[in-house]
């Protein structure tokens, strides 16, 4: 399939290590994929769903101890500890290669090794980059087919001589939790993942390559790899404004990217187009603006909470050619269910672990981090620019997270530098997307804490440098919070499609047609400029959602000081300055 010696030599080396019984080159053809599907069905790795109701759809269950990303077992093995920085786990690459070498040694004996060539980004785009993943999992092959441009065409994009490809090695091995490692060697363009079978740990094109390795490449090559959705908002005149938004895992990217505006806006002619729901690669274009592509080709979305009201476009996207992981199986008709899909949980069903499930006993049927892997081309609101090799020009960058208090519904940074400060000080409650406690507030700069492949202080510097390059063509930067709660813990803002009302203010700010008031933390809309017509939300509530509680923010400043303290000399002076400005503003 390729004559590229760099690829062939590396594969030989890895083969000698993992010692597979058989090797299969994945060409991406339907015939080959069908054979693999058949095999996975025969071994029970996959379960075939109702082919009339859900054509091409399959169900998979992971091991019960293997349901989310494992941040404490994820390493950035830069040559020096300094280069991985204080927010990443680090081990000397030599020591790590040695340690994992033992786990990989013979790990594919009695198994088949699949060689997956894949391209992140449209084939032929100057943004795009190739990876090769070696794996012993058919689940990985079938998911990579949905999530990337996979097969022979990826080798064609790479060419016969290039060495610019990411070397990914994955083995399920024994799915041993104690020996589970997700390890990145940024200077070697290499990822080794062992003892897991869960999405984010094993679909190496996604977080491992497109964020951790790519963020390092981006720093070296002068671009950006970010945990961001990309959407286009079309107004009644047919003008489309593109924005990116960085929210931590399970904080609403897929939902915002596929949002359906409220009826009133639809009637006026507003539309939202999805370019991406998780990752953006951004470059300065020939016109000096920031341009973005989505390196992925599908969506690996959170199932719970997805329904015809919250996100109809996502649900419709999953009705064919989709792999469901860790959801409920309805035994009556071989369809799937999860919490928040509808109010009729199936009576005759298996839960995500494959055990008979009694929906009345209060237990959850689907895992909170159960997911669907769905082809982008299924999405009813997919942007016509999805495959554009040049990407789309970005007018705004939106940061956001889950904050019960403190962060207001929306505010705008005074300029790019202040925006970098806002992004670098983001905090959010943890979710089920990663193993560990849920609902604990932690700092998650730019939603990249688990995904930055180098020293986060250098990452902040890189953001500031990108701002210098962009000058007055830099996107405007905003922060949003859909998750403020009342005293009973209920979300105050309706969220989902109604986030359009906030997005509209953001876009109008970019166009220079909306007003703002200056507060201690940045520019906010006038409460009456957030349109609440048709909502059960009063002007008073909007005021409340926009309020900046100075005491809470003074506490916030303490937290930021503590967090910034970690970065020592690597913390840019500019960010220290921004923090002192915030302190001054709060004391005024
Ligand atoms: P990853 O795929 O993990 O990166 O997550 P994501 O950022 O794409 O999050 P997603 O859109 O899948 O949403 C995660 C959860 O947040 C789901 O259960 C949603 O129902 C919920 N959610 C999304 N948007 C909103 C919102 O505007 N308001 C409220 N209250 N919940 C939301
Ligand atoms: C996330 O956790 O941010 C995800 C899912 O998008 S995973 O691919 O598992 O990282
Ligand atoms: Mn994500």
Image: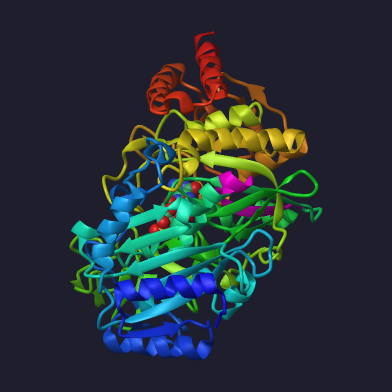
Residue drawn at x 24%, y 64% is 103
Residue drawn at x 44%, y 48% is 451
Viewer can see residue 323:
no
In the depicted view, which residue is nearer to us: 132 or 377? Answer: 132
Q: Quadrant of residue 313?
A: bottom right
> Residue 342's spot in the image, x, y percent?
39, 65
Taking the image as shown, residue 489 lies to the left or right of residue 293, namely left
User: Quick check: 181 above or below 455?
Assistant: below
> Residue 196's spot in the image, x, y percent?
29, 64
User: Quick check: 379 above or below 74?
Assistant: below
Farthest residue in the top direction? 588
Q: Quadrant of residue 417?
A: top right
Residue 225 falls inside the magenta stretch: yes
In the depicted view, which residue is nearer to us: 108 or 519? Answer: 108
Taking the image as shown, residue 395 lies to the left or right of residue 408, namely right
Tell me the magenta residue range. Answer: 218-235
Q: Quadrant of the C terminus?
A: top right
Residue drawn at x 43%, y 74% is 11
> Residue 154's spot in the image, x, y percent?
58, 73
Taking the image as shown, residue 133 lies to the left or right of residue 121, namely left
User: Quick check: 459 above or below 151?
Assistant: above
Taking the image as shown, residue 20 lies to the left or right of residue 417, namely left
Q: Quadrant of the N terminus?
A: bottom right
Colouring used for the render: rainbow
């Amino acid at each position: 399939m390729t004559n590229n010696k760099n690829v062939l030599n590396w594969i030989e080396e890895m083969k000698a290590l993992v010692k597979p019984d058989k090797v299969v080159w994945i060409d991406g053809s339907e015939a080959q994929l069908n054979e693999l599907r058949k095999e996975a069905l025969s071994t029970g790795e996959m379960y075939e769903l109702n082919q009339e109701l859900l054509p091409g759809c399959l169900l998979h269950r992971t091991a019960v101890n293997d349901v989310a990303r494992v941040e404490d077992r994820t390493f950035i093995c830069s040559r020096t500890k300094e280069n991985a920085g204080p927010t990443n786990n680090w081990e000397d690459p030599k020591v790590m290669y040695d340690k994992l070498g033992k786990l990989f040694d013979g790990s594919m004996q009695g198994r088949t090794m699949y060689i997956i060539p894949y391209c992140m980004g449209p084939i032929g785009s100057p943004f795009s980059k190739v990876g090769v993943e070696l794996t012993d999992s058919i689940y990985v092959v079938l998911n990579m087919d949905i999530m990337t441009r996979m097969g022979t065409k990826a080798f064609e994009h790479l060419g016969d001589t290039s060495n610019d490809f990411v070397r990914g090695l994955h083995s399920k091995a024994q799915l041993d939790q104690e020996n589970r490692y997700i390890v990145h060697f940024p200077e070697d363009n290499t990822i080794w993942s062992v003892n897991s079978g869960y999405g984010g740990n094993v679909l190496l094109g996604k977080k491992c390559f497109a964020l951790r390795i790519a963020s390092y490449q981006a720093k070296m090559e002068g671009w950006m790899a970010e945990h961001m959705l990309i959407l286009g908002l079309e107004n009644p005149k047919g003008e489309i404004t593109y924005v990116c938004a960085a929210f931590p895992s399970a904080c609403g990217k897929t939902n915002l990217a596929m949002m359906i505006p409220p009826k009133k806006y639809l009637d006026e002619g507003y539309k939202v187009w999805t370019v991406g729901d998780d990752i953006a690669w951004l470059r300065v274009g020939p016109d000096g603006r920031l341009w973005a592509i989505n390196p992925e080709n599908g969506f690996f979305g959170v199932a719970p909470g997805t329904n015809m009201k919250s996100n109809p476009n996502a649900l419709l996207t999953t009705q064919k050619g989709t792999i469901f992981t860790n959801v409920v199986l309805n035994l009556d008709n071989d369809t799937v269910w999860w919490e928040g899909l509808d109010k009729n949980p199936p009576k005759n069903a298996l839960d995500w672990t494959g055990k008979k499930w009694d929906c009345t006993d209060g237990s959850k049927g689907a895992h909170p981090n159960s997911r669907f892997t769905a082809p982008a081309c299924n999405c009813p609101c997919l942007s016509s620019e999805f495959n554009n090799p040049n990407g789309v020009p970005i007018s705004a960058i939106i940061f956001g997270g889950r904050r019960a208090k403190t962060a207001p519904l929306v505010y705008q940074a005074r300029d790019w530098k202040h925006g970098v400060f806002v992004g670098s000080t983001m905090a959010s409650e943890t979710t089920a997307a990663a193993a560990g406690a849920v609902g604990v507030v932690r700092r998650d700069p730019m939603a990249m804490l688990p995904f930055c492949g180098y020293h986060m202080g250098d990452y902040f510097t890189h953001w500031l440098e990108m701002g210098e390059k962009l000058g007055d063509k830099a996107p405007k930067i905003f922060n949003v919070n859909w998750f403020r709660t009342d005293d009973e813990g209920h979300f105050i803002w309706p969220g989902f499609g109604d986030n359009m009302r906030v997005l509209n203010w953001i876009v109008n700010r970019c166009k220079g047609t909306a007003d703002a008031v200056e507060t201690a933390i940045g520019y906010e809309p006038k409460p009456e400029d957030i349109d609440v017509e048709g909502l059960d939300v009063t002007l008073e509530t909007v005021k409340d959602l926009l309020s900046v509680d100075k005491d809470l923010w003074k506490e916030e400043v303490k937290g930021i000081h503590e967090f910034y303290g970690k970065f020592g000399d690597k913390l840019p002076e500019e960010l220290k300055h921004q923090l002192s400005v915030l302190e001054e503003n709060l004391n005024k």
